Every structure is written in C-alpha cells, then in structure tokens.
Amino acid sequence: MTPSVRTVDFLVIGGGVAGLRAAIELASKGSVLVLTKDKQTESSTEYAQGGVAVALSDEDEVGIHYEDTIKAGDGLCRESAVKILVEEGPGLILELISWGAEFDREGSKLSFTREAAHSRKRILHSRGDATGKEIERVLIHKARTSPSISRYDFAFTLDLIMDDDRCIGATVLRGDSVINIFAKAVVLATGGAGQVYSRTTNPMIATGDGIAIAYRAGALITDMEFIQFHPTTLYSPAAPPFLLSEAMRGEGAVLKNLSGERFMPQYHDMAELAPRDAVSRAIVSEIVKTDSKHVYLDLTHLDGDFIKKRFPVIYATCLQYDIDITEEPVPVSPAAHYIMGGVCTNIEGETSIKGLFAAGEVACTGVHGANRLASNSLLEGLVFGARAGGKAARYIEGEKTDIAGISAGTEDAAGALPPASTFDVEKTRSTMRQFMWNKVGIIRCEESLSLAKKWLDRKQFIMEMPSRNRREFELKNMLTVAHLISESALFRKGSVGAHFRTDFRAKGERWQKHTACQKGRALKWID
Ligand code: FAD
Ligand code: SIN
C-alpha cells in the first residue's frame, strides 16, 4: 500500500483541552490539522468532573495557589512552570468565559468549591460535575469558527516523521490507509496513559501513545515514576472504576470503613481532603486491614436535592448500578488517574526534538512535581497548550522549516500493513494491566517492581513484530510506557509524592532530581 501524503503548516496531535487550545493559538499563523484517534470529543478532558482550579475568587490570591501547588508537588515542582500556571491561568479562564464557557454561579458571582490540598475554595465547575465537557464544547466550537483549522478524526498516529534530528510530521493510520502528514511544526497533545493499569479512571484512548511515539523518536522523557492514583472510584463488580469526584469530599462527603467508622487520620487537619496519595494509601491500608476490596464514601448526611443538583452525572451513573448516593454509602477504591511524567518540555512546550512541541498530560513541564494538585490539569492544558502553540508559530518564522522537497520524495516511506500478529494481543494487554496494578501501583518495592520489569522484558519480542491495527500499535505503546514507569520507579530508591516504596520510605539521597529516560541511553538523574 502506498501511503497518501498531506502537507500542513502545523500538525496538532490530540483534540483535548491542550491540543485544541494550541490549535486556536496557531490558527492565525497558518494551516492547522488536528488529529484525534477516536471521535472528536473522546478524551480525558470530556470526562473531567470536579473542575478547574484558578485564583479568581475574592478570598484567593495567585500566590496562595502557587504555594498550594508547590506543596502538593512535594518538592519536585519546577517553580517557573508553576508561576506561569497560576499567573496566566486566570486570563485564559476569563478568555474561555468570553468564548461562551458557562461555569456555575451563585447569583451573578462565579461559584468556587474546594478540593484536596487546596487551602482556598478555588475550583470552578460547570453543570455541577460536567466541567470538562463544557470546556471541550467551547474549544471545539471556537476551533470550528476558524477556517484555517481542519481535523481528522479516527486518525491514529503511528510515529513521527524525522528529517535527521528535526520532526517534520507524523505517519497516521486512518481506517486501512496510512497517511504521511508533513508539517513545519508538530504539537503533541495526546493526553495520559491510565490504560496501562487495570483500574483507571481514564478513557480507552489514554494508552500513552504520545509518550511512546516521542520516546521512539529519541525525545527525553522525565518523571515517569509519578503516577497519581485517585482515591475514590466506584467499586462494583458490574461497573468500571467510574470517578467519584474529589469535589464530593470538598462538599462534605466522608470516608468510612466496612464497620461504618471514619478512618482518615488528621493530615494537617485535612482528613478526607489530604493530598490524593495520602488518601489513596490510607484507603489501601484500610482495605488490607479489613481484608476487603473497598471502603465507603458517605454523603448520606448531605441534602439529597443538593447532591442531585451538584453531582448530576455521578448521581445518574451510580443509579445505573443500583446505588442511590443520596441514600446509601458508595463502595469506593482507588484507581490510576493521572501521569505527572511525560515528554520533557520547557515552559514554552519545546521538547528535546527540534520542531516537536508538547502540552497537556503527555508533557512533563514539571508543573505538577511528584503529585498534581487537584483540578490543575485542565488549567495546565489551557496555559501550556496556548504557550506550545505560540512557540511553534514563532519556530516556523525563525527556522528553516521547508518541507516541500522532503514530502515530495517520501511517498513510499510507509509500506503495506503486515499480516496478523501471532500472539494474543488482548491477553497480553490484560495481563500487563493487571501486572502494573499489582506490582507498580500505589505501594511499590524492589521485589514487586523487579517482577514487573522481568515480565515486561519477556514481552520485548512484541516490539519487533509487525502490527496491523490500532489495538496492536496501542499495545506496543502501552508496553513501552509500562517499561518507562517500572524502570523509573525502580531507579528512584525513595518515596516522594505519589511514588511510595515500602523498602525506601524516606525521600532518599537524590530526591530533588528528576529521572530521565532516552532511547538507547541508560536512565539518569537530571536537575
Ligand atoms: P486529553 O483530553 O486526554 O486528549 C487527548 C487527545 O489525544 C484525544 O483527542 C485523543 O484522541 C488524542 N490522541 C491520543 N493518542 C492519539 C494518537 N495515537 N493519535 C491521534 N490522536 C491521539 N483534571 C482537572 O483539572 N479537573 C478535573 O476535574 C479532572 N477530572 C478528571 C476526571 C476524569 C474521569 C479523568 C480521566 C481526568 C480528569 N482530570 C481532571 C484530568 C484531566 O482531565 C486531563 O489531564 C486533561 O483533560 C488532559 O488533557 P489533554 O488535552 O492533555 O488530553
Ligand atoms: C476530581 O473531580 O476528583 C478530579 C479532579 C482532578 O483530577 O483534578
């Protein structure tokens, strides 16, 4: 099969908050093509519930948001990135409101709620617990109004196209066709990797493709051991681990064990609103102590009508599984939720590869350090999506980015798709996800991590085998990401933020450094 060719000025891979905001920033600078691997709205952004953190309330200040973010990051945040996040965030939220975003209000004033580790009420929300949907709606609408932005949905990016050390596009699988898309600059905004774990809040698209793609092209990948596990997801044999927003605890919901007793220690007077890693570990410890599979999230002391109005999506979803959250405690257990590590970028979204920019969950600006503060991710997507777009635009003005000659000569670059794989793709995927949950999960140690690494090493042969469809390409990406997480977790002999090792409970000697992986090189520490 001969791949077809398309040429644009800017290729944006991903249509969540980060990709769309980058595309909007680029729209006045040239032609922009946005790729999504599924339908346009299918993204973590679409499912975001609790809200977006921003210092806009009368009781809040940018400096306090900064302090809370730094504290949650447990000493590993890049301060320059945090400063930008909290300072540029308010302007970008007001801009979003001017584009039509409707956040919940009390009278005419914006309504703010509280989430874990925030010292102020600073979380804006929309239609109760449908904040991400509203942000995605407004950004899609804004992008549609720009004639220079076009899109390919169900376009699965396979790999980046490189010209020596410069990224000049991507190879994409669309249906049965392979397309080489050439661009003067590429923005990677493919979101997270929660699907490498068997219990995750993330949608099916979150298979870490962007991290694996960038790694294969030689990009620097940092902080991969830092996975955030959300404490409260629905635990029911019939249901996926559906997220029960932290905002519920912000509104007064409490955690109880099977005997109906509260068990959260008073962590700096925060109890249920302690940082996510602390709450997740307390839940695991309670589950082990009581030899059970879950604990309970109890809201029954709150007004039923308030709960239905404040959390309509959660109320309706739990009811589908015969749980009325206004009348009975909900069985909950933690699940993988967010990856703090990813493709290393500076504060302008530049990666270590010329012509390749990254923003959103796929990127690691260091803004979240070792643990992300709740509701800082949507804000990150807006702030660093806009920045990556702005820098990509300046890059093509300043650099020699001619791709016309190259694209004309590479029509045969990607060959025909090969015949079917000879190993069981679905079984491997499922076993890997269980391994990651059991051995590289909330609580880790040398023994568990080594077992995971050994299993992953044995699956390396899969990397050499040809792939035919999205599922098979995804599996390779997931195995790559699982490897990077496990190796980084083994490398960091200490417990920091969301990375907790029972064999090294203290932070360890080089804890203020970041782990860095690059293809063909040994894992190392960087500042
Ligand atoms: P996404 O929104 O995930 O978008 C990724 C895009 O990349 C998609 O369009 C996808 O199709 C595309 N893509 C991926 N791989 C490929 C490929 N190979 N080829 C082509 N396209 C590809 N954060 C908050 O701040 N507040 C919250 O309340 C909140 N709640 C959350 C609730 C849930 C259930 C989840 C899962 C996350 C939540 N988060 C929240 C985290 C936050 O939603 C995400 O971190 C953020 O939306 C990520 O945005 P993104 O643009 O980086 O990626
Ligand atoms: C939630 O609503 O609990 C998720 C918020 C987040 O991930 O930031």
Image (spheres, helix red, strand yellow):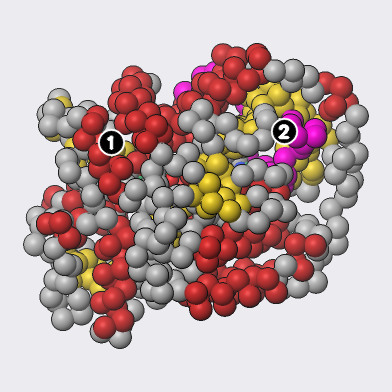
Q: Secondary structure at mark 1?
A: helix
| Nearer-the-camera pick, 371 or 159 | 371
The residue singled out by tag 2 in the image is 167
For the N terminus, the image quarter is top right
Give the number of the disc on residue 66.
Answer: 1
Return the x and y of residue 408 as percentages of the image width and height: 88, 26
Picture quadrant where residue 186 is located = top right
Per the picture, the main secondary structure of the magenta-coloured stretch is strand
Q: Earlier in the sequence, mark 2 or mark 1?
A: 1
Q: Confirm or reject: label 2 Cβ below 8 Å from ligand 1.
A: no
**Amino acid under disc 2:** Cys
Seen at 30% across and 86% down, the residue is: 291
| Nearer-the-camera pick, 408 or 436 | 436
From this viewpoint, is residue 507 visible?
yes
Q: Which residues are magenta?
A: 142-169
Q: Confirm or reject: label 1 Cβ below 8 Å from ligand 1.
A: no
